[in-house]
Image (cartoon, helix red, strand yellow):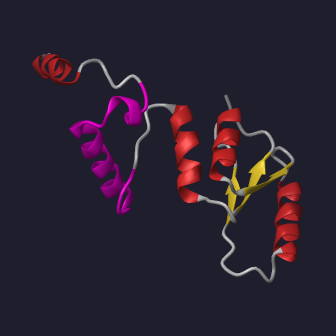
């Protein structure tokens, strides 16, 4: 109980939203470091607010000139992240692997002479 009380006194009840608005605290950074170590990766990042994840993670990895192939059924927050990336977005039929394959083949054919073309596939792992 004492550790709970002291953590509550030090940090309050939580960040209540995105770190960009409410700040990053030492326990965020410690948790990210532990996750990265567990996964064997150089780094990790945690988001406490789902929409901020979609609005910032997608544009952080993709940019204008990239192509993103996305499931047409992705959450509107993901669609906004795709828009914010300024990438070319091509949608395939929801949960249809044949449609995905056909879309990828069309893109490969259309852009076969384009150098350094970065391509991404965006799907949702959990549906709301």
Residue 12 in the image, given as x and y percentages of width and height: 24, 19
Left/right of residue 108 with respect to residue 12 in the rendered view: right
Q: Which residue is drawn at 83% across and 68% down?
A: 107
Q: In this view, does 84 lie above or below 114?
A: above
Residue 86 in the image, given as x and y percentages of width and height: 68, 53
Q: Does the magenta run of residues contain 61? A: no
**Towards the viewer: 9 or 79:** 79
**Towards the viewer: 65 or 76:** 65
**Towards the viewer: 40 or 12:** 12
Left/right of residue 28 with respect to residue 57 in the rendered view: left
Q: Residue at x 43, y 32 (%)?
A: 18
**Considering the image in quadrants, where does the N terminus appear?**
top left
Q: Residue at x 29, y 39 (%)?
A: 28
Q: Is residue 2 above or below residue 25?
A: above
Circle count: 0
**Considering the image in quadrants, where does the C terminus appear?**
top right
Q: Residue at x 67, y 39 (%)?
A: 80
Residue 70 in the image, given as x and y percentages of width and height: 75, 51
């Amino acid at each position: 109980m004492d550790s709970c009380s002291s953590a509550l006194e030090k940090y309050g009840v939580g960040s209540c939203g995105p770190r960009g608005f409410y700040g990053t605290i030492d326990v965020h950074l410690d948790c990210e470091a532990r996750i990265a170590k567990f996964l064997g990766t150089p780094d990790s990042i945690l988001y406490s607010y789902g929409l901020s994840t979609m609005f910032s993670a997608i544009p952080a990895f993709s940019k204008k000139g990239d192509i993103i192939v996305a499931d047409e059924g992705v959450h509107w927050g993901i669609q906004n992240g795709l828009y914010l990336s300024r990438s070319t977005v091509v949608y395939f039929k929801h949960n249809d692997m044949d449609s995905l394959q056909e879309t990828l083949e069309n893109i490969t054919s259309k852009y076969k002479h384009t150098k350094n073309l970065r391509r991404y596939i965006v799907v949702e792992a959990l549906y709301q």
